[in-house]
Amino acid sequence: MPGIALNPGLRVLVTAGASGIGRSIADLLIENGTRVHVCDVAEHHLADFRAAHPGHGASICDVSDEAAVGKLFDEVRKGLGGLDALINNAGIAGPTGGVEDIAPADWRRTIDVCLTGQFLCTHHAVPLLKQAGNGAIVNLSSAAGRHGYAFRTPYSAAKWGVIGFTQSLAKELGPSGIRVNAILPGVIRGPRMVGVIRARAGQVGESYEAMEQEYLNRISLRRMTGPEDVAAMVLFLLSPAGINISGQSLGVDGNVESL
């Protein structure tokens, strides 16, 4: 039976890989013998990654910027010599507010980073994955890509788009031996979720503590998910154990019942 040990020397790009969920993914992959290149928009996070992993690549890149993504892949080809897997992790929370109050520029920015960024990176990655003979793409969606999310319409729309993108790619790239899946994290411990809960509490006039409990009450396991749990799912999907998993939307969320 196949195990979850990765093939030696696997070459992986993790977008937004210098902090948060992306950093947990990169750390776990490196721990398991993978050659990793990360990109991020925050130079201080990249500096921290470089200090921790001096043998691995790190690039500044906004994935919504077409020219910046092209430069990123020039650096990936130079540093890794090819690519075996792409982890499309980059995303932003976007605005919290009623649809009539959300600025069109904030809508576009959320879609550009959370959805178009995945297209741009995949556009450049697929020729490298085909050259490698096989490969895998893991797209980060969200529980918001399965449930409607009041007052977070730009984010939810983008994450639903990721599901359609994933399923379409799985059909398109399967004959080339490339597996494509989406991971749907739920309420993830960390500063971004603190900001989301605080913004939602302000929107409806509740305390932070009351709103946090509301979020927990919508999770069957009544607990937040750690970024390390998402990283473990990525490890599984890139391993031989995930060789026949493609086109799937995999929740790592304690069973979020609603948002």
Image: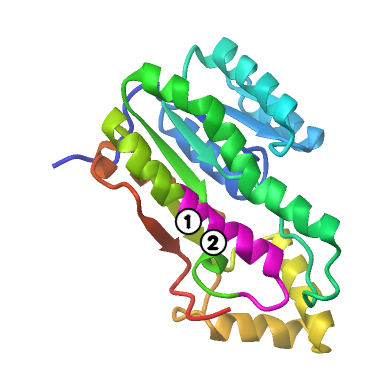
How far across and down, in percent of the image, does residue 138 sit?
45, 43
Q: CA distance from mark 1 to mark 2?
A: 5 Å
Q: Residue at x 67, y 38 (%)?
A: 18
* The label number, if any, that marks residue 160 in the structure image: 2
Along the line of sight, the residue nearer the viewer: 128 or 26: 128
Q: Is residue 152 visible?
A: yes
Q: Are marks 1 and 2 in contact (CB under 8 Å)?
A: yes
- Left or right placement of residue 220 versus residue 95 in this view: left
Is 142 drawn above or below residue 133 in the view shown? below
Within-10-Å neighbours for mark 2: few <14, some 14–19, many 20+ = some
Residue named by callout 1: 163
How far across and down, in percent of the image, does residue 132 sit?
37, 18
How far across and down, in percent of the image, does residue 6 sit?
33, 32
- Left or right placement of residue 142 versus residue 7 in this view: right
Q: Amino acid at mark 2?
A: Trp
Q: Is residue 232 visible?
A: no
Q: Residue at x 47, y 56 (%)?
A: 163
Q: Main secondary structure of the magenta part?
A: helix
Within-10-Å neighbours for mark 1: few <14, some 14–19, many 20+ = many
Screen quadrant of the C terminus: bottom right
Task: Indicate yes or no whether the magenta region holds residue 16.
Answer: no
Label 1 sits on a secondary structure element that is helix
Is 38 drawn above or below residue 166 in the view shown? above
Is 90 drawn above or below residue 39 in the view shown? below
How far across and down, in percent of the image, does residue 47 sit?
75, 29
Which quarter of the figure has residue 169? top left
Give the extent of the magenta segment.
Answer: 149-165
Q: Residue at x 79, y 38 (%)?
A: 42
